[in-house]
Image: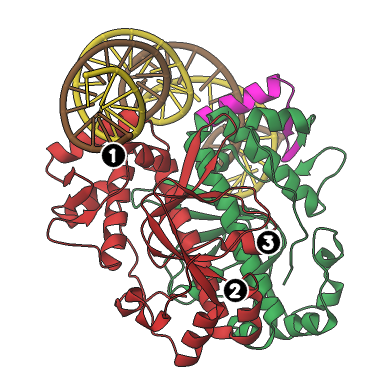
Chain colours: A red, B green, C yellow, D brown
DNA sequence: CGGTGAGTTGAGATAAATCAAGCAGAGTGG
DNA sequence: CCACTCTGCTTGATTTATCTCAACTCACCG
């Protein structure tokens, strides 16, 4: 594991999505970091069921949380983008109830094993931020249940694409030709409870309807409002989020 | 709202499911409570989308969290039983992203509006408990996504019934003839993303297979192990949970 | 170049939805 | 005490969204 770098130089902190942090808090965060770790695409970052786990912040790259049934059926719970915390559940509950896998090469910022209790004891502001992030992630999963349970395939694919587009854009990944999109059709299928074949057909329809351009690992959405309508997806205004 | 009652006399605390609490913490919890409130079955405890919200502990009765699409399709996110916290998301995020409705008559214990920041500032142990409860609820929703996305109707119904059975039992509701079951088939359908008709047929099959007895608002599961097998449902050992 | 993973397309099968009707028990009001 | 209405449940018939199976293309890679 490489040594930690200077948090003040962290490129994420400059983004308007993230909340400002006091100098004291920043120092504490820096102090609790023990290093960064690169992992390659496809690597298992955290294995489900393991008792001892580590807390990370995703600095760069994409990942996802998932669960599997013992016969291999897999459900993706949500996708992780830069700024997301991972491993908190393993820290709090006895064992980590899900796995985390890297979708691209990722850069992770690791915390010391006692970082969480230390924050709660000495830095209530940061403790509250951690809880905020937990509540926020639960909101995402709530949305996922709604999609999988009550949206049609067409609707849930559209809603997922809009969601990812907005998230990636808020992490500063949007360009003229859309956002990077390292997700395969099978991943979309596993996130939405669909078969890969059907996912493919739905994507075709969205392409032919002129709603999206999706090729070469990039996603472009022409008319966001129209896609929102297709997906019955109206998101709540996003306040600034904390970054550890 | 009636005055708060003595937390030391709280019948829930006596149950083995709940973690012991120090005298100081108990006093702080008691101090932060401003009263109890009864609500009738079917009442909306918290409306989705509202900005100002209150934090409650469910003392008695059943409730559920849900989201709806604007055309009326409803998804139940999870069921709430005694000891569950409700309204935390509204406290942390700007607005409450889901609704909460009472299934039976409920008794709620209300906290003062500044209780959360106060706990985080002065009582790190309780703050950590709150975060534990948030992480635990997220785990439940993770399981819900897995059920809705990847289990068959038969499997997810079986898994839900086992889950509710265990939870109710751990809240001291189990008797010779099973547990109270105030949930209609439509609720089950909305929790699992199924139609009420299909839910009914699946329940018939479980009845005829001798797996469950379900009548008169009571649920009995003859062979838990067999039901677990049907639902592909193996839960992680439950450590003691905190109670606020 | 063979091999592998992602994506595509067609044909057919099926789990689950929808539509429709009817039944039983619990209230409610006359 | 008797209609009357409601809500929850049940059952049958039919439709449909989505899955499964299978084959084929294409790009990339060692």
How crowded pointer 2 is (Cα within 10 Å; few <14, some 14-19, many 20+) is rated as many
Residue B112 pos. (x, y %) = 62, 83
Closer to the camera: disc 1 or disc 3?
1
Q: Nearer the viewer, residue A165 or D4?
A: A165
How crowded pointer 3 is (Cα within 10 Å; few <14, some 14-19, many 20+) is rated as many
Closer to the camera: disc 2 or disc 1?
1
Output the chain of dot 2.
Answer: B
Q: CA distance from mark 2 to mark 1?
A: 37 Å
- Residue linked to disc 3: B106
In reply to whether residue B203 is colored magenta, the answer given is yes
Q: Which residues are magenta?
A: B198-219
- Residue linked to disc 2: B55
Is residue B78 placed above or below B30 in the rendered structure?
above
Output the chain of dot 3.
Answer: B
Residue ID at (60%, 58%)? B137
Question: Taking the image as drawn, is residue A155 in sight?
Answer: yes
- Residue linked to disc 1: A154
């Amino acid at each position: 594991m490489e040594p930690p770098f200077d948090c003040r130089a962290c490129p994420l902190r400059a983004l308007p999505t993230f909340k400002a942090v006091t100098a004291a808090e920043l120092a504490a965060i820096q102090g609790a970091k023990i290093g960064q770790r690169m992992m390659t695409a496809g690597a298992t970052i955290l294995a489900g069921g393991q008792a001892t786990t580590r807390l990370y912040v995703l600095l760069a790259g994409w990942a996802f949380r998932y669960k599997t049934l013992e016969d291999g059926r897999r459900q993706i719970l949500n996708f992780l983008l830069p700024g997301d915390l991972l491993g908190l559940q393993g820290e709090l509950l006895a064992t980590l109830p899900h796995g985390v896998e890297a979708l691209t090469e990722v850069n992770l910022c690791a915390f010391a094993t006692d970082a969480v209790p230390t924050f709660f004891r000495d830095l209530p502001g940061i403790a509250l931020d951690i809880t905020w992030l937990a509540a926020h992630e639960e909101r995402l999963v709530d949305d996922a249940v709604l999609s999988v349970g009550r949206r049609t395939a067409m609707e849930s694919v559209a809603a997922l694409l809009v969601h990812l587009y907005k998230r990636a854009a808020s992490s500063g990944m949007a360009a003229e030709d859309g956002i990077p999109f390292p997700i395969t059709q099978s991943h979309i299928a596993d996130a939405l409870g669909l078969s890969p074949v059907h996912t493919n057909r739905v994507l075709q329809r969205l392409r032919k309807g002129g709603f999206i351009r999706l090729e070469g690992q990039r996603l472009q959405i022409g008319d966001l409002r129209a896609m929102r309508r297709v997906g019955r997806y109206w998101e709540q205004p996003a306040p600034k989020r904390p970054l550890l």
